[in-house]
Amino acid sequence: MAASRIVHRVCTLCEATCGIRVHVEGDSVTTIRGDQDDPFSRGYICPKAYGLKGLYEDRDRLRAPLVRTSSGFEAVSWERAFEVAIDGLLAVRERHGSDGVGSYAGNPTVHSLQAMLYLSVFLRALGTKQRFSASSVDQLPKMVSSGLMFGSGLNIAVPDLDRTQYLLVLGGNPAVSNGSLMTAPDAAGRLRAIAARGGKVVVFDPRRTETAQLAAEHHFLQPGTDAALLLAMVQVMFEEKLVRLGRASGHVRGLDAVKNAVGAFTPERVAAYCRIEPAVIRRLTREFCEAPSAVCYGRLGTTCQTFGTVASWAVDLVNVLSGNLDAPGGAMFSRPAIDNSGGSRYTTRARGGPTRVKGLPRWFGEAPVATLADEILTEGPGQIRGLFTFAGNPLLSAPDSNRLEQAFRSLEFMVSVDVYLNETTRHAHVILPPPTGLERDHYDLALYRFAVRDVAKYSQPVFAPPQGQPEEWEILLTLAKAMWGQRALSLEQADEIVFTGAVKEAHESLAASFPDLTLEEIKRALPTRRGAPRVLDVLLRSGPYGDAFGRNPDGLTLAQLESTPHGRDLGALKPQLPQALHTSDRMIDLAPELLIADVARLEVDIARQLPELVLIGRRQLRSNNSWMHNIEALIKGPQRCTLLVNEQDAARRGLRHGQPARLSSAVGSIVAQVEVTADMMPGVVSLPHGFGHSSAGAQLGVAALHAGVNINVVSDSAIVDPVSGNAAFNGVEVTLEPVA
Ligand SMILES: Nc1nc2c(c(=O)[nH]1)N[C@H]1C(S)=C(S)[C@@H](COP(=O)(O)OP(=O)(O)OC[C@H]3O[C@@H](n4cnc5c(=O)[nH]c(N)nc54)[C@H](O)[C@@H]3O)O[C@H]1N2
Ligand SMILES: Nc1nc2c(c(=O)[nH]1)N[C@H]1C(S)=C(S)[C@@H](COP(=O)(O)OP(=O)(O)OC[C@H]3O[C@@H](n4cnc5c(=O)[nH]c(N)nc54)[C@H](O)[C@@H]3O)O[C@H]1N2
Ligand code: SF4
Ligand SMILES: [Mo]
């Protein structure tokens, strides 16, 4: 009988970082349970965690690299695949310059320690300015507003969920998503606990969501109008003299400019636009300001809309002006064991020039993915002719899929690093598949930044990757050294360069505290390792809790985390003003010029006639964006890709429950199955994203049986939040009619 064992680690599928117990017999996972001893998740898991088993076992998952030939994809050796990928990328770069190769990094990048550490090495080596990622179909507006206010795009204030007495949620559904920019395992349990301790949860959402059902109060809000609603709350705070800065006192500038900017946003002026009664806005503002502690939290519904950055800023204005920034139970900055928020990449000074075709802004070294198709299809210097995608499925996740597909077809060369042959990667000339999450170690470099409690946990791999299968970092580094022009370098030599870079940075960051600490001393203090864990150790030991390579003997090291398999609790969020700020004067800019200027656009918009019908998205518990639909255990059951339509809207158009209807926008049209429900606001329909698995040539046998339709065929890439360039999926004007 095969030896059985249990491995404790984290689930790497969503932002919640739940602790799991993986039960293993030989090479098989027998089951996956919650880890009761994880100090953060305390045994909680959602149904997706079990999907890690399905992913590991999935017969469609790629286990060998593929090269596209005239007769289709062919499995080849790793040596051959690297050769084709590298020759192809170098040739495009040779012909069209470094900006001739574009790159796109998808969501699972943040769920891979190896990708977090080595993708940027490759992208720098590639040398392209044409970088894109899923950030610009997601949280970019929040990064921009936080960068402008607090000095770093990673300076995102997190709801102190476990201590707050009043939570105001706009456009987030943590009961299903388990929190986003708010790492909170068992978010639903944590929300229930607010009411249990006598607090209150209020939700603004065009749909009565699972989170709304847990709340004391839910209001249907017209999509895209969060900024107006929140600025009206700020207006009421000034008018009723409720403004107090609390811990932010003495650390803010621009208060008068805010007061001037919000003057026009009285509850009465915004009521019809938001479809919220003025009395409700006034009452909730008072409640919020009078609560012992309160926090306003906005998520995807507030960022993926045309006023995404102003709405994200307004969320923080409500928090700061009610005295809840940096206060327990309010919006606080985390203090993770690895603090990358001060990195120059995330300062707003790092704003690049406008994009070539549409003149959209470039933030944090990236261009908005809403304009990727333009950059591929429009001729001229800097046109993208080759593409590198990493852990991304933009053909299902970015707006205007039909045009993007046309663009991908026109590419000279494309390489994808991905575990599936799917809607996007079927356009690649080479697909390089990494091992799955269970086959690698992990540390949540990105997500602990947004955690509602400071924690640190290092996960060991459950299985070693099969013989001959390169790890994700090895794939990236092999490509990177070739882009450096140093193909002959061994992987070990290339990794030494990465490691030495990390040691140098650590040395610089510790110089102020330990001026006599030398590079040699640092290297000597580190045990022999290779790859991601070696760099991780450097980061942990030079971080805020670190042992400074022996100078703080009680401090944190990777070795310590290795011997704490359930994870280390670093305590509740701590007040950190002003040292958490990264603005040059360590002051919070309450009135960034760019945002004050955009308020003028909002003032025009609030007078606009609302469209008859608009489209929004939604997430589902047993699904994860576009890529977990091939796992039988998660996808089985009734069709989930349904269009939610309010009873009135359905009746008016002669639509019936369970019947197909045609949904059309300015750019496309799809047929979806109607689900009539009282949970939708009249005038708003909702369809989940990530479906539409009927593409020829994809290798997704199970997903194809539950194909659904791709919402992003109707999302318009021309509709963006102009400040950030982020796509605005929410509030797209649509028409709906029965299909004969
Ligand atoms: N209309 C609409 N569109 C949306 C959204 C919406 O709400 N509405 N949401 C947006 C949001 S928030 C996001 S984050 C994006 C997501 O956008 P993307 O990141 O582009 O899409 P995903 O569906 O997450 O695709 C992940 C890809 O990574 C691959 N993959 C999975 N695991 C690994 C791994 O370990 N390594 C590698 N190399 N590859 C792996 C999968 O096979 C898949 O191809 O979608 C956005 N699009
Ligand atoms: N189960 C599951 N969990 C996930 C994911 C998944 O696919 N499945 N994806 C992960 C990812 S990549 C992310 S980014 C997070 C997202 O996490 P959340 O933001 O919590 O998730 P959504 O369900 O997209 O929530 C958006 C909500 O905004 C509402 N909404 C739409 N437009 C507007 C508007 O204009 N104003 C307001 N106030 N509300 C609006 C929608 O009805 C919806 O309820 O979830 C993560 N977790
Ligand atoms: S909520 Fe579910 S998918 Fe997210 S980390 Fe926890 S178990 Fe994994
Ligand atoms: Mo996301």
Image: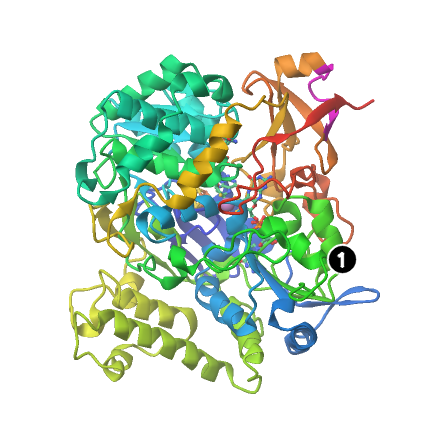
Q: Quadrant of ligand 3?
A: top left
Question: Quick check: 508 above or below 16?
Answer: below
Question: What percent of the width, then of the height, locates residue 599?
Answer: 44, 35
Instruction: Say whether residue 161 is visible.
Output: no
> Where residue 703 sits in the image (x, y, percent)?
68, 44
Identify the residue shown where x is 48% and y is 39%: 308
Q: Is residue 476 left or right of residue 160?
A: right
Residue where numbered disc 1 is placed: 409
Asked whether mark 1 and ligand 1 are closer than 8 Å, the reply comes as no
Of 249 and 406, the residue lying toward us? 249
Between 560 and 252, the one nearer to me in the picture: 252
* Residue 654 sits inside the magenta stretch: yes
Quadrant in the rendering for residue 279:
top left
Q: Quadrant of residue 616?
A: top right
Q: Is residue 609 above or below residue 257?
A: above
Question: Could you say which is closer to the camera, residue 145 or residue 715?
Answer: 145
Residue plotted at (51% across, 36% down): 621
* Disc 1: CA contacts within 10 A as few (<14), some (14-19) or many (>=20): few
Displayed quadrant of residue 191: top left
Q: Is residue 339 above or below residue 643?
A: below
Q: Kindly identify the residue that appears in the image at 70 percent across and 62 percent down.
A: 428
Q: Which residues are magenta?
A: 653-663
Q: Is residue 49 left or right of residue 84?
A: left
Q: Secondary structure at mark 1?
A: helix
Q: How many marks?
A: 1
The three-letter code of the residue at mark 1 reads Arg
**721 and 72: which is toward the camera:** 721
Q: Would residue 478 be seen by someone viewing this image from the given angle?
A: yes
* Residue 573, magenta (yes or no): no
Q: Give the left or right position of residue 478, taking residue 45 as reference.
A: right
The C terminus lies in quadrant: top right
